């Protein structure tokens, strides 16, 4: 497989609006939704039409551009609308730092604009959002080629959740490593944890890999440890919603269990994340805010109740894995191997080993 663009668009700007593939409906229905205002984009992020840390950041940036381009009046009115959109979008999901990274960039673009010209300001904000989208694809591609070097030919790779093209503007983080390895001619097979409660592995990872002709097998979350114990898995690669300065990271609930099982059986465990996911202002995993989502995601499957009425449930969307369980952090700037304050600090200075 040579380098080729995704066969689907996760999120893009089309005819003055934001268009997203509705991930809640996959794999059965492939529907693109059009959003005409920032409220719609915020609602789409909150309700998981779009999800995955980098994709959330890109959608939010486009949401700010949308607010600016749809506001008539002078430059002050445009700036006010863009600032309000930043506040609105920042309140959607708390864990993925890419959201705040992208909104910070939009705010910086806004405050660096000296123009009193509303047209120029709208154009500048749209250009910034489109640049964030393009850069995300480029970061995934660079990360993919750094990571592909770690993939043995013939490898069976375990992944959790969906860290693919659907979780980014294209190519993916963990699945970007897989795609780049395939582009290099390596034969790989992916085991995808189904990822309860919202089944991002079963629905989304399986959908996008099958579509690209990459062999994928879905397993239930509880099966991962026994596949690792039986020596059937050569490496684990997952994405991240936030990587702290010491290398601890948050990712979809269940990632910690996979990391512990991989360590117990001596299987290398890699985290693939673009630099926009690394949060040097968060010292360690304990400081990462963890989103708690609605109970009905656990109590119901496809609208049908699966737990007894009245029994409480917990639904943290993410867990934190300590850096000591991670073999290497794969970024677009290179590897932090093992990830810790020193190796991440070197990447922060821009090193590409
Ligand atoms: O709740 P989600 O689906 O947004 O969670 C997504 C994940 O946990 C991904 O693994 C993470 O965002 C990395 S995506 C490249």
Image (spheres, rainbow, N blue to C red):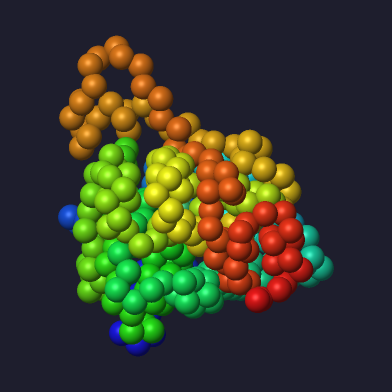
Whether residue 100 appears in this view of the structure is no
Q: Looking at the picture, does residue 330 appear above or below residue 158?
A: below
Position of residue 204 measured from the top left corner of the image (x, y, whole percent):
29, 56
118 or 274: nearer the viewer: 274
Q: Looking at the picture, does residue 110 appear above or below residue 200?
A: below
Position of residue 257 measured from the top left corner of the image (x, y, whole percent):
41, 40
Look at the image and tell me in which quarter the N terminus lies: bottom left
213 or 65: nearer the viewer: 213
Position of residue 330 measured from the top left corner of the image (x, y, whole percent):
55, 65
Specify whether 29 is left or right of 53: left
Position of residue 271 measured from the top left corner of the image (x, y, whole percent):
50, 58
Q: Residue at x 53, y 48 (%)?
A: 325
Specify whether 155 is left or right of 169: left
Please identify the residue farthest to the right as the structure is shown. 114
Specify whether 237 is left or right of 273: left
Q: Residue at x 71, y 73 (%)?
A: 351
């Amino acid at each position: 497989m040579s380098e080729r663009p995704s066969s689907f668009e996760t999120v893009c700007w089309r005819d003055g609006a934001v268009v997203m593939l509705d991930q809640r409906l996959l794999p059965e229905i492939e529907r693109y939704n059009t959003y005409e205002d920032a409220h719609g984009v915020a609602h789409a992020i909150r309700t998981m039409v779009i999800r995955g840390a980098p994709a959330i950041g890109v959608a939010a940036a486009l949401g700010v551009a949308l607010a600016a381009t749809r506001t008539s009046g002078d430059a002050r009115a445009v700036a006010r609308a863009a600032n309000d959109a930043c506040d609105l979008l920042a309140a959607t999901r708390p864990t993925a730092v890419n959201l705040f990274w992208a909104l910070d960039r939009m705010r910086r673009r806004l405050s660096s604009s000296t123009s009193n010209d509303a047209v120029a300001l709208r154009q500048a904000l749209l250009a910034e959002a489109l640049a964030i989208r393009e850069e995300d694809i480029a970061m995934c591609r660079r990360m993919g080629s750094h990571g592909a070097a770690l993939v043995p030919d013939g490898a069976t790779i375990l992944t959790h959740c969906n860290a693919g093209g659907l979780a980014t503007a294209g190519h993916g983080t963990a699945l970007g490593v897989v795609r780049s390895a395939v582009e290099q001619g390596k034969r790989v097979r992916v085991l995808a944890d189904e990822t309860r409660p919202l089944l991002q592995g079963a629905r989304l990872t399986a959908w996008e890999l099958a579509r690209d002709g990459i062999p994928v097998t879905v397993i239930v979350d509880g099966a991962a440890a026994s596949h690792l114990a039986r020596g059937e898995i050569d490496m684990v690669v997952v994405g991240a919603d936030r990587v702290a300065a010491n290398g601890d990271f948050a990712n979809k609930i269940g990632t910690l269990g996979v990391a512990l099982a991989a360590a117990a059986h001596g299987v290398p465990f890699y985290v693939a994340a673009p630099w926009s996911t690394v949060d040097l202002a968060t010292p360690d995993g304990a400081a990462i805010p963890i989103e708690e989502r609605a109970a009905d995601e656990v109590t119901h499957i496809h609208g049908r109740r699966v737990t007894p009425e009245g029994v409480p449930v917990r639904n943290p969307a993410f867990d934190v894995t300590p850096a000591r369980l991670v073999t290497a952090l794969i970024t677009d700037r290179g590897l932090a191997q093992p990830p810790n304050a020193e190796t991440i600090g070197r990447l922060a200075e821009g090193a590409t080993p």
